[in-house]
Amino acid sequence: MTDHNSTFHVAETVVSYDDICLAQKTLEPILRKTELIESTFFSKEYGNRVFLKPENFQVTGSFKIRGAYYKISKLSDEEKSRGVIAASAGNHAQGVGYAAQMLGVKATIVMPETTPIIKVEATKKFGVQVVLHGDTYDDACRKARELEIENGYVFVHPFDDIDVMLGQGTVALEVLKELDDVDKILVPIGGGGLISGIAMAAKMLKPGIEIIGVEPDGACCIARSLDENKVTELKKVDTMADGVAVKTPGALTFEVIKEFVDEVVTVSDSDILEAILLLMERHKMITEGAGALSVAGLKKLAPEDKNVVCVISGGNIDISTISAIINRALVSRGRQFCFTVNLPDKPGELLNVAKILADLRANVIKLEHNQSKVMDRFKLVQLEITVETNGHDHVRQIQKELKKHGFEIIKIY
């Protein structure tokens, strides 16, 4: 452990261990305890001792309450009287709404028009005014800045603010209090506020700890900026993890990440979907795409039997999308296999295919045997089958066995 009098410089601001402790003391009365969960499944799957920090169980369903509440609590009475404004894809909006309600401050939130309905409605329940504008966080942020000037509001940035970072950094204090021999912390990245706060706090307590950021391939603004060695705006973002769909990182967060974050990795939407599915199946835990990023990032680590903590940053997912996500994740994991096969138009052929599948213990969950789909030249009937499988090896085994019996199949997914 390092000297608790250590200080870090962020732009023109000096940040000390006492500053992070003050944030922790301020937040303690309003936070839920999100104690670490050891995952025997992920530990075995990835060759490290894996722990989950379930911030999806937090007040408002994500870590964002930490930074938002701490920032608003530090405003002067004059600033509070003017009201606050924020831009958010959802979780920061709820954090600001909750904090404003608790502290008696008027709040306006600008959210992208693409924000899931569950997040919009959850935000409105805190009595805030919601303005929908643009397709991305960046569009909403520009609108919020306009309203800030027009109405004299105080802008509460979702990530590029020292007080917000200090609030988020309290996650690291809790992790290290529970597990002081942690080797690595995996953290989702959107604009960089969470990982900046965690990195500063963790490095003050344990300089040798590794902080690893995880971004989606389709919204990797930090990875791109690190490559360019300057804050870089992406031309577009395209990811199912709407909570981290940020084109441009913060200037402050970028400087902190450059200095204190050891590595930033990117993962595909398929990796994220698989992580969501596994968290549901193995831990009965509902997470949004952004929330599952750290678990998706476990694939990028070498199996070294290290103590690894994955920050599950949020669980505000629209229930209506869960079914589609599960189906996509099952396919990605090799747990569902859909294919077509052309059968001779005569009795018994369907039974032959069914027997092969039964012998291989592939459970048929959907079948379309349509005799109207006859290829006249060969007198073949097209059969479409969806089966429940046990993984990619099982799918390959089914393909091999059907081919062995003379059936030519076309994989749909």
Image (tube, rainbow, N blue to C red):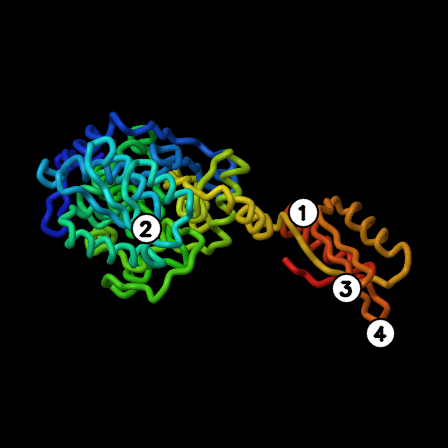
Give the x, y percent position of residue 96.
26, 40
Of callouts 4 and 1, the N-terminal one = 4
Give the x, y percent position of residue 117.
42, 46
Foreground residue among 353 and 212: 353
Residue occupying the far top of the picture = 29
Asked whether, in this view, residue 181 is left or right of residue 347, the answer is left
Q: CA distance from mark 2 to mark 3?
A: 50 Å
Q: CA distance from mark 3 to mark 1?
A: 19 Å
**Residue 302 visible in the snapshot:** no
Residue type highlighted by circle 3 = Glu
Closer to us: mark 2 or mark 3?
2
Of callouts 3 and 1, the N-terminal one = 1
Q: Quick check: 64 above or below 217? A: above
Residue occupying the far right of the picture = 347
Residue at image coords 17%, 35%: 73
Residue tagged 4? 377
Quadrant containing the N terminus is top left
Residue tagged 1? 389
